[in-house]
Amino acid sequence: MIDTDTFVTVLYVLADDFCKANLPPDIRPGPNASLSRSEVITLAVFGQWTRFESERGFYRFAQRHLRPAFPSLPHRSQLNRLTRRYREDITAFSLYFVELLQARTAHYEIIDSSGVVTRDAKRRGNGWLPGLSEIGWSNRIGWYEGMRLLCCINPSGIITGFGFAPANVQDRPLAETFFALRHTPHPDLQSVGQPALCPYVADKGFAGKKCQQHWTEDYGAQVITSPRRNSKTPWPKAMRRWLASIRQIIETVYDKLHNTFRLSRERPHHLTGLQARLAAKIALHNFCIWLNVKLGRPRLAFADLLDW
């Protein structure tokens, strides 16, 4: 367990080293921003803890407790604009830990999706994110309006890539785009990360002989799923249980994102805000794993990591 000042300091030092070593100089016209890029990344990532019930709650905490470390802390609206401006850099920082923790050396990666609610599915009107959020189904929450988040993790829980789409997009089309972007990267869609050096393990939502063969041949992505129950060659019960057991880690990771890092309570008004917050949550998750490794603690022991 460490205090918040130490946590923020370590996070800032790591973010600053990352920006200097991996990002081009931040040169923009006009007067300099009140916060540097490293400071914005640090505040954006730290502010995702569920202890802060909202962005307003985090800003009040920052005003009371983080002023000595960030004396030029701007108004909350300006801080939000800076966070959205650096959303791509926050995304790159979130995947920086894949390299630090050598996460791509695992024997397999697990891929799965989860529903992200943006508003009540029964409300009328366009609401927030019109034309982007849609009605979809999630086994965890039922019918909802929002987005579908796809994450890829290694067996120790490190998120190696992520992406999202409207909630009505099914797993296989979402995986198709994910694997295609990993195979042929796009400069504006770097959140998917690098291609896995091992097979992917997935649930039945990704099953299908033709699509799996296509992913292997065209993208080099071998996806392992148990056949559907009506398949002509069903797996034995023991094999289905084994596959379910090694996939359990991704349920734990999604629980961290939704509950420990407040994803289930997000109600974004703009797509760039959703991108920035989601990337910050991924970065905080991977940073906490990295910090726990350094402290000799269990990797996913987040609840007692900070002495608030």
Image (cartoon, helix red, strand yellow):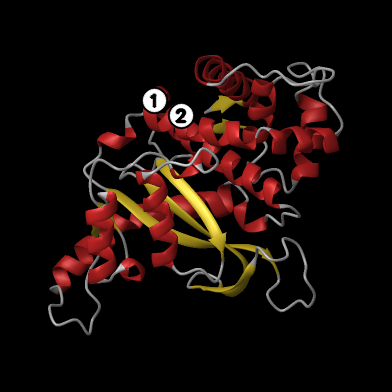
Between 74 and 254, the one lying in front of the other is 74
Quote the CA–CA distance across marks 2 and 1.
7 Å
* Label 2–label 1 contact, CB within 8 A: yes
Q: How many marks?
A: 2
Q: Residue at x 80, y 43 (%)?
A: 56
Say few, some or many: other residues with alpha carbon within 10 Å of mark 2 (under 14 / 14 to 19 / 20 or more).
Answer: some
**Which residue is denoted by mark 2 in the rendering?**
96
Up-down relation of residue 66 to residue 222 (above or below): above
Q: Position of residue 5 (x, y in %)?
A: 65, 21
Is residue 222 at least partly visible in the picture? no
Q: Position of residue 97 (x, y in %)?
A: 43, 30
Classify the position of the C terminus by image quarter.
top right
The secondary element bearing badge 1 is classed as helix
Up-down relation of residue 2 to residue 184 (above or below): above
Is residue 157 at least partly visible in the picture? yes
Up-down relation of residue 42 to residue 231 (above or below): above
In the image, farthest residue toward the bottom: 230
Q: Position of residue 142 (x, y in %)?
A: 55, 76
Q: Position of residue 306 (x, y in %)?
A: 57, 32
**Which residue is denoted by mark 1 in the rendering?**
100
The secondary element bearing badge 2 is classed as helix
- Corner quadrant of residue 136: bottom right
Judge from the rendering whether residue 250 lies leftward or rightward of residue 213; answer left or right: right
Mark 2 belongs to which amino acid?
A: Tyr
Say few, some or many: other residues with alpha carbon within 10 Å of mark 1 (under 14 / 14 to 19 / 20 or more).
Answer: few
Judge from the rendering whether residue 149 lies leftward or rightward of residue 6; answer left or right: left
Between 129 and 236, the one lying in front of the other is 129
Judge from the rendering whether residue 46 lies leftward or rightward of residue 181; answer left or right: right
Between 23 and 80, the one lying in front of the other is 23
- Corner quadrant of residue 213: bottom left
Q: Residue at x 61, y 72 (%)?
A: 144
Mark 1 belongs to which amino acid?
A: Leu
